[in-house]
Amino acid sequence: MSSLPKNFGSAFDLSGLKNPVTAAELAGVAVTQESLMSDVLPASHAQVVILICWSARSPQSKTVMATLGKLHKDDSAKPDGPGWILGNVNVDSEVAVAQALQVQTVPLAIAIIQEQLVPLFETVPTDAQLRLVIDKVIALAADRGLGNPAAQSPEELEEKLEPEEITALTALETGDFDGAKAAYQEWLNRAPSNSLAHLGLAQVELLIRIDGLDSAQVLAQAAEDKLNIESQMQAADCEIAQGNFEGAFNRLIATVRNTSGDERKKVREHLVGLFALVDPAEPGLVRARQQLASALF
């Protein structure tokens, strides 16, 4: 983790873009030099702040910003709130902020935990990878105890990562899903009841299943062949990765109703595996469990 440079207040701003992004395309709160110091950093003592550094010249950065916006909106709909604050930094117009954050390329995502900076990625991750990153950061921050003077130091927070977890996250950064899966499995072999290890393994297995798939093509094929359980399970995986939990659950519950024997068992087990990827407090998950029970009995 790192902090803002001591001379941040004397940094200077540069201007503008010829083709600015419209307000409708922005996600989260626009961060300026002033708001970073007066609002964002103080807020990081109460909640995780995730900043997406973007540029109108980078379509990839705008795509990541849109996905983060959707995830934040989904999390905001939960009873306990999102658990994190989303901000966006236009590196072209907020040059002082970009310099302070040491932005070298976009897209770049940075978490701020009690005014400490934690770079998250400098790539274009999938929706499922973004979900994994956010969940992990929130879990680490919760362990640290935001706003608690007795909380661990940044170094102590980093030390809380299990060795297998570090291996898994390093593998994910390079797209080595098989290596990440093996690391999470080793963690589970050592600590079978660890919930984070179970979640990490389930998320990596999802990433492996959807790797290389064209989600639009998969969903179109599933719509044409509703009796093909493999198509339906692939489509549900894509929907889960996109954050469409309800669509994925409804799809597989309908498939359970339309199948029997070994096929029904296979679909049910796949659906239960997807349940593990969703917050237990999610209202849609509770309904889906009830609907699955009704479909089975």
Image (cartoon, helix red, strand yellow):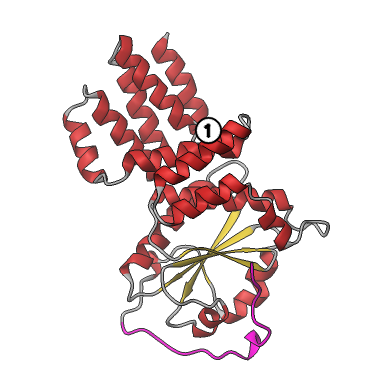
Q: Is residue 112 left or right of residue 27?
A: right
Q: Is residue 108 left or right of residue 1?
A: left
Q: Is residue 115 left or right of residue 92?
A: right
Q: In this view, does 212 lie to the left or right of 22?
A: left
Residue 86 at what x, y percent from top left? 53, 61
User: Which of the 4 image quadrants contains residue 271?
Assistant: top left
- Give the magenta range: 1-18
Q: Is residue 150 visible?
A: yes
Residue 4 at what x, y percent from top left? 64, 77
Q: Is residue 244 visible?
A: no
Q: How crowded is mark 1: few (under 14 residues within 10 Å), some or many (20 or more)?
A: few
Quadrant in which the N terminus is drawn: bottom right
Q: Which amino acid does label 1 sit on?
A: Pro
Quadrant in which the C terminus is drawn: top left
Q: Name the residue under label 1.
A: 283
* 8 is higher (above) or lower (below) than 150: below
3 within the magenta span: yes
User: Which of the 4 image quadrants contains residue 38?
Assistant: bottom right
Q: Is the magenta stretch mostly helix, strand or loop?
A: loop
Residue at the (75%, 61%) spot, across then down: 153
Say which element carries label 1. Answer: helix
Residue at the (45%, 28%) spot, across then down: 273
Residue 248 at what x, y percent from top left? 36, 33
* 95 is higher (above) or lower (below) than 256: below
